Amino acid sequence: MGRFDTMKERFDEHDLESGLFLKFDDGDKHLVAFLGEPHLKEIYWEGGKSYPWKPGCGKPKVLKTSMNAAVVEKTKNGFQVICVKILENSKTFYKAVAKMDAKYGIDSQVFEVERDGTGTDTTYSVLPEGAINDELRAQLDELELHDLEKADEATGDDSKKKGATKSTKDEPATIITQDDGNDLIARLKTLRASLGEKGDAMMAEFLAKFGIKKIRELPAKCLKEAQSWVTQEEEALRHAAGDGEDDAFA
């Protein structure tokens, strides 16, 4: 193990435990035990953001599902609960979960969920990882589940909050590296082009949120938050592109 690996694990653990929703970037995978009943809500997408769908709103209705999920890690004796999150995704994802339930029973298994891709070119896989033993079952039975009907993505996701992130006197605002800047610029350029006439507004919102005039001026400490912000916008665009049952990403 490298000298920075332990530090990275601590940062990753902190990122996982913060917020209400379980987030995935490209290549991320989590071990989860699904809990409770799924919740279905009706939304529509506009300007890269989702809003509750209501009859007469003039927007196409999109179905989105969510479920409580205990995030776990492997141990010598089985699995250990890390935290409880809300796993929110498309109808295609939950069709895959339903297939796993029919074949294995989701109440008896831990599953590995992995994301592959970014933007509109994204897929999720759901695979059985191992049986829930008595020790893990006892942990799961003691967990307090989130109220899915009251959960609000805007309050659960700090990356959606308004206002720029400011540096403090105790933490110098060193800027992102050239490689990180190049990657962020490439993703934002693709996103802006995909949004068409709304792309410039998206860029203005990004710059205003982090209090910068150029992407390369982003403080290094804000990189993770900026990447999560872009990922959410890509997810919104991906869902907005879905137009029916046959859409693989709907």
Image: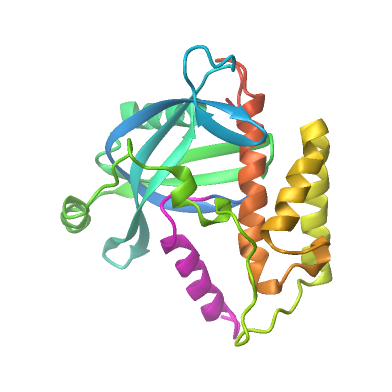
**Residue ID at (59%, 86%):** 3
Image quadrant occupied by the N terminus: bottom right
Indicate the position of residue 8 as horizontal and vertical percent values. 56, 74
Left or right: where 232 falls relative to 83: right
Please give the name of the residue rendered at 29% of the width and 46% of the height, measured from the top-left corner: 146
From the viewer's perspective, is residue 78 above or below residue 1?
above
Q: Residue 245: x and y, percent?
A: 55, 15
As displayed, is residue 108 above or below residue 22? Answer: above
203 relative to 40, above or below: below
Residue 162 quadrant = bottom right
Which residue occupies 61% across, 54% down? 228
Q: Nearer the viewer, residue 239 or 109?
A: 239
Q: Is residue 246 left or right of residue 141?
A: right
Q: Is residue 17 within the magenta segment?
A: yes
Q: Nearer the viewer, residue 204 or 137?
A: 204
Closer to the camera, 127 or 20? 20
Number of marks in picture: 0
Quadrant of the image occupied by residue 17: bottom left
Going by the image, does 66 lie left or right of 62? left
Residue 92, above or below 113: above
Residue 235 location, quadrant:
top right
Q: Position of residue 178 (x, y in %)?
A: 84, 69
Residue 125 located within the stretch drawn in magenta: no
Q: In this rendering, would 206 be left or right of 85?
A: right
Q: How is the image coloured?
A: rainbow
| Outermost top residue | 56
Residue drawn at x 33%, y 49% is: 130
What stretch of residues is rendered in magenta? 1-23
**Residue 151 in the image, given as x and y percentages of width and height:** 37, 42
Q: Quadrant of the C terminus?
A: top right
